[in-house]
């Protein structure tokens, strides 16, 4: 399983699209930059280029200050009312940032903002879970998470209401538990490229699906995009919910609970 957060999500998708998925069962994008962050004619909802130019200027002139203010504010959502900043987390973010090369950071702003991963997303033929907080102030939710899930042939969007960009740290208990759901021994690549789960496994979270698209339930909504399969073929919906497609192309849901396999997790995980 390949896991990438933020810019690392782009690295995961580019790697899988370039080198294939023979050795990968599934992937996870967390608060990730794909498809593309910068505003263009084909991506009108992106952030304007002057915003990223400003970031580059701050990296070049006073990155020590930038690397303190960034985690103190938008990265972890510490600028939101009622959220108490954690000085240790902020200091650790600054420490990690200052160990990197200034030139790499400067060039990295262009890499993570202007790289177009659209074709890479379309090329990845394994189940990919897209995890994104809808209060992400760094990688805007509406222009990244939902679009990536739509472009991925077997993409699933899981939205975390109110979670910030740095949710793997601020909400580690939730994010880690959801990642563990995907790492059990029953998630094994098959010749079809899908991932099979026991049909009898109960449902871990409410997942309502109608006509191939999910109906978000209370809590963190989950959205599915269906792989194209022949009428009557037994399929696994994006590798998570066993499903049969009827002649009209509608998915018939069968419940699944990945929590049943948490204690037996064994799938190798690569984190970017």
Image: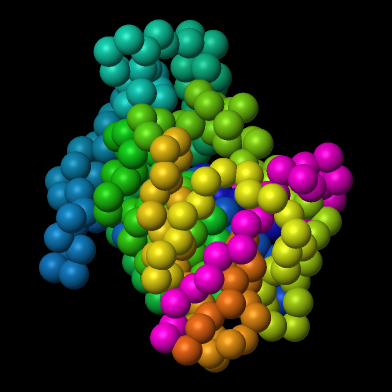
- In front of the other: 207 or 159: 207
In the image, residue 262 sits, relative to residue 171, either above or below, namely below
Q: Identify the residue shown where x is 37% and y is 13%.
A: 83
In the image, residue 270 sits, relative to residue 89, either above or below, namely below
- Residue 163 appears in which quarter of the rendering? top left
Q: Identify the residue shown where x is 62% and y is 86%.
A: 233
> Residue 122 appears at what percent x and percent y?
44, 76
Taking the magenta stretch, the answer to whether it contains residue 256 is yes
Q: Identify the residue shown where x is 79% and y is 47%.
A: 261
Q: Does 177 sit left or right of 153 as displayed?
A: right
Q: Is residue 103 visible?
A: no
- In front of the other: 150 or 240: 240
- In front of the other: 12 or 175: 175
Quadrant containing the N terminus is bottom right
In the image, residue 155 sits, relative to residue 227, either above or below, namely above
Q: Does 47 sit left or right of 234 as displayed?
A: left
Q: Identify the residue shown where x is 46% and y is 55%.
A: 208
Q: Is residue 249 visible?
A: yes
- Residue 19 appears in which quarter of the rendering? bottom right
Specify start and end residues of the magenta stretch as a single range: 248-272
- Residue 168 appears in which quarter of the rendering? top right
Taking the magenta stretch, the answer to whether it contains residue 260 is yes
> Residue 151 appears at what percent x and percent y?
39, 70
- In front of the other: 8 or 229: 229
């Amino acid at each position: 399983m390949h896991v990438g957060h933020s810019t690392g999500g782009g690295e995961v998708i580019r790697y899988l699209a370039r080198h294939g998925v023979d050795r990968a069962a599934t992937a996870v994008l967390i608060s990730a930059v794909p498809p593309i962050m910068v505003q263009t004619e084909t991506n009108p909802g992106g952030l304007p280029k002057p915003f990223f130019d400003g970031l580059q200027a701050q990296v070049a002139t006073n990155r020590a200050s930038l690397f303190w203010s960034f985690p103190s504010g938008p990265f972890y959502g510490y600028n939101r009312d009622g959220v108490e900043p954690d000085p240790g987390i902020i200091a650790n973010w600054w420490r990690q940032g200052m160990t990197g090369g200034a030139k790499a950071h400067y060039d990295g702003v262009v890499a993570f903002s202007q790289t177009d991963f659209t074709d890479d997303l379309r090329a990845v033929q394994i189940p990919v879970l897209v995890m994104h907080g809808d209060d992400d102030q760094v990688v805007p939710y509406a222009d990244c998470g939902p679009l990536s899930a739509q472009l991925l042939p077997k993409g699933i969007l899981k939205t975390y209401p109110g979670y910030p960009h740095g949710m793997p740290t601020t909400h580690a208990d939730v994010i880690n538990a959801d990642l563990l759901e995907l790492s059990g021994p029953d998630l094994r690549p098959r010749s079809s490229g899908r991932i099979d789960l026991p049909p009898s496994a109960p449902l871990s979270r409410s997942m309502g699906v109608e006509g191939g698209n999910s109906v978000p339930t209370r809590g963190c909504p989950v959205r599915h995009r269906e792989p194209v399969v022949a009428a009557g073929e037994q399929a696994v919906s994006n590798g998570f919910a066993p499903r049969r497609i009827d002649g009209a192309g509608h998915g018939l849901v069968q419940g699944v609970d990945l929590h049943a396999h948490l204690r037996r997790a064994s799938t190798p995980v690569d984190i970017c």
